[in-house]
Amino acid sequence: MSRLPTVSHLKIFEAIIQHGGMRAAAKVLNQTQSNMSRSLRELETILGAKLMVSDTKGMVLTDIGRRFETRVKRVLRELETAVNEVKQVKGLHQGSVSFGCSHTKVFKFISNAVTGILQAYPNAEITLYEGQQSEILPALREGKLDFFIGIISNAISLGEFIEEPLFSCSFGVIARKGHPLAHATCLAALRNAKWYLPVADAGYYNDLESLFFPAEADIEYSILKGDSVAVAEHLILEADYLSISPKLIEQTDSMKDLFCFIPLREKLPDGHYSLIYRQQTTLPPLARLLITEIHKECSNDIAINRGRNVSSISTPQERG
């Protein structure tokens, strides 16, 4: 190819897709529709292929356009990462970090680490996404996130990632204090209850779901799924839902007086938390600094250290 598209070509192309049409994209980018249309035609001429067509619903990607758009996202993301890293290396105290985490509210070390970074980088932009490993991993693979902290499961391959173990902790079934089932002692007694569980196609919570709700049992289960801590708290406190949570919540002042763990005879598997990031990507300094701060704060976190069961802590190799 004798001529390559410019960054402007790619950004305009992506904006048209993101905003559903030429008019909306032009407004967001503060350009005229004629400029947007001309840029798209230039891009298609450079590539020698039609990327979009118009229909009654607006601009629609062709098959070639869909293939090209996947690559464009990665190119723009890598370019943004490169610019971000240069700014950080130059000591401009700006840049951005995006990471995923499960059970954010329970872990004080997360907020402590973020606070420490914002003191060192006052203009930094830190974005946190809450979710489980199976749901967050695609965004991590695509470079949308710098790293993820959560329960690591042997059922999900981490061959392309670097894993840094953090800690292990116990889990239990959580309810509001005074729940009618608060004193139940076996899983079978809870199966007719209303449940709010994290979204997970594989991994720790998916395994627990099979344990709690066996397919062979002739029971209709009431299960609502989501990854919102606020929704979980509301449903547990106001609608008598049950959920599954790290027992470290008992160390959280704002929550320990409202919730209780049901004293089941069956012991739930421990959750093994690790920090993971892609092997083939050099983390920008700001992300590396945040990871270092997270390790330090995690080691200092009294609640986590109280909750440690030394015999349950293991390395990834031992767990594998």
Image (spheres, grey):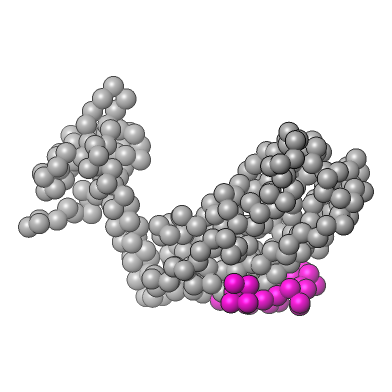
Residue drawn at point x = 24 percent, y = 42 percent: 65
The N terminus sits in image quarter? bottom left
Q: Where is residue 186 drawn, in percent x and y?
A: 86, 50
With respect to residue 218, does 115 lie above or below? below
Q: Where is residue 249 drawn, in percent x and y?
A: 78, 59
Total residue callouts: 0
Residue drawn at point x = 49 percent, y = 72 percent: 162
Q: Where is residue 216 drawn, in percent x and y?
A: 71, 41
With respect to residue 263, does 294 lie above or below? below
Q: Is residue 178 left or right of residue 67?
A: right
With respect to residue 264, does 169 lie above or below? below
Q: Is residue 238 left or right of residue 224?
A: right
Front-lying residue, 96 or 157 = 157
Q: From this viewpoint, is residue 20 visible?
A: yes
Front-lying residue, 184 or 220 = 220
Q: Which image quadrant for residue 274? A: bottom right
Q: Main secondary structure of the magenta part?
A: helix
Residue drawn at point x = 31 percent, y = 42 percent: 15
Magenta range is: 292-320
Residue drawn at point x = 32 percent, y = 52 percent: 73
Residue sitting farthest toward the left: 2
Residue 314 included in the magenta stretch of the image? yes
Front-lying residue, 283 or 190 = 190
Q: From this viewpoint, is residue 149 visible?
A: no
Front-lying residue, 102 or 84 = 102
With respect to residue 35, does 74 lie above or below? below
Q: Where is residue 130 drawn, in percent x and y?
A: 59, 53
